[in-house]
Image (cartoon, rainbow, N blue to C red):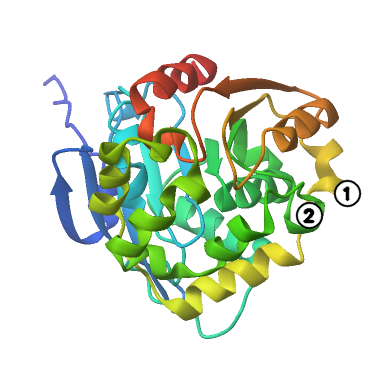
Amino acid sequence: MGTAKKTSVAVAAPQDRLKDVQFDPKSGMYIGTLTIGEQLLRVGIRPGARVGGALTGKPLLMFNGIGANLELVSPFIAELGDTETVIFDVPGAGKSPAPKSPYRLFTMARLAANVLDELGYDQVDVLGVSWGGGLAQQFAIQFPARVRRLVLAATTMGGQTMLPGKPSVLWKMINPKRYRDKGYMKSIAPDIYGGSLRADPDAIKLFTDHARGGDSKGYRYQLLAMAAWSSLPFLWRIHHPTLLMAGSDDPLVPLVNARLQASLMRNARLHIVDDGHLFLMNKATEVAPVVREFLR
């Protein structure tokens, strides 16, 4: 009798499911597009370590800040080692077209779940920064079985339950002009973001070099989605191990917000970074190892 030959079956990588893919050597991300229903999304995937086509750890799903394009967190993503990471420009931010109408966070969480389905991911770790931290909480509440661990960076429990900074800081943040006008960004960065951006021109340049303005309508939709949302009534339902990260000098989201949230969550610990609101970008080499260790 002859011996049956073993045939190897090629396993499609998640980035192979994207269209118009380009590779970014600085971050290690494959950046392309994905269509969910009628919504076109710009998606970035940084491949992680695999054995026989299977990941050696859980992939990390990231949600970005308001108006932010995925390149803004690319310095952090580049420091994540062998952690497979996926992030997408929220509709109306970066290069994802704005949706036809306003939405709520539960709609965006469902969109994120559909993105994971299309890319072939099941359970993931989730990291949300600033506005994306609200979406990360909503995702964990809405799809608890799909989340293993949760990282919340420079974020709050929502617009209605946020302990805000100075009104002048919030007023400047409402205007998306900082993503389009580098001169304007340089003038307001110290007041809005604090930390490294108060005195370090290189920190401001890091932002302006990576920022890509999105759609003004999409920015307004993001503001509306967060204005009427709060995780406080549902916070007890988040049972996942959670790492809360906050900047010691954050004018936009003062540290007291993270302290309060850590005290209310069942399974959370707080890590304070000696920086401002953008510590995930400006202190990437310091912060990424903390996240990697927590997710390990």
The vertical placement of 241 against 121, above or below, is above
Q: Secondary structure at mark 1?
A: helix
Q: Secondary structure at mark 2?
A: loop
Q: Residue at x 47, y 42 (%)?
A: 61
- Residue 216 image position (x, y, % from top left): 45, 77
Query: Of the numbered discs in the image, which one, if any, rests on residue 233?
Result: 1
Q: Nearer the viewer, residue 252 or 63?
A: 252
In percent of the image, x 39 and y 44: which residue is there? 86
The front one of 123 and 235 is: 235
Mark 1 neighbour density, 10 Å: few (under 14) some (14–19) many (20 or more): few
* In the displayed structure image, the side of residue 171 where residue 41 appears, left or right: left
Local packing at callout 2 (Cα closer than 10 Å; few below 14, some 14-19, many 20+) is many
Residue 205 position (above or below residue 57): below
Q: Identify the residue at horizontal 78%, vertical 49% (top origin).
A: 231
Residues at discs 1 and 2 in contact (Cβ within 8 Å): yes
Look at the image and tell me in which quarter the N terminus lies: top left
Near-viewer residue (120 or 227): 227
Residue 279 in the figure: left or right of residue 81: right
Left or right of 248: which side holds 70?
left
**Left or right: where does residue 120 sit relative to residue 175?**
left
Type of the residue with mark 2: Ser
| The residue positioned farthest toward the bottom in the image shown | 100
Mark seen at residue 230: 2
Instruction: Please give the name of the residue rendered at 53% of the width and 38% of the height, measured from the top-left corner.
Output: 127
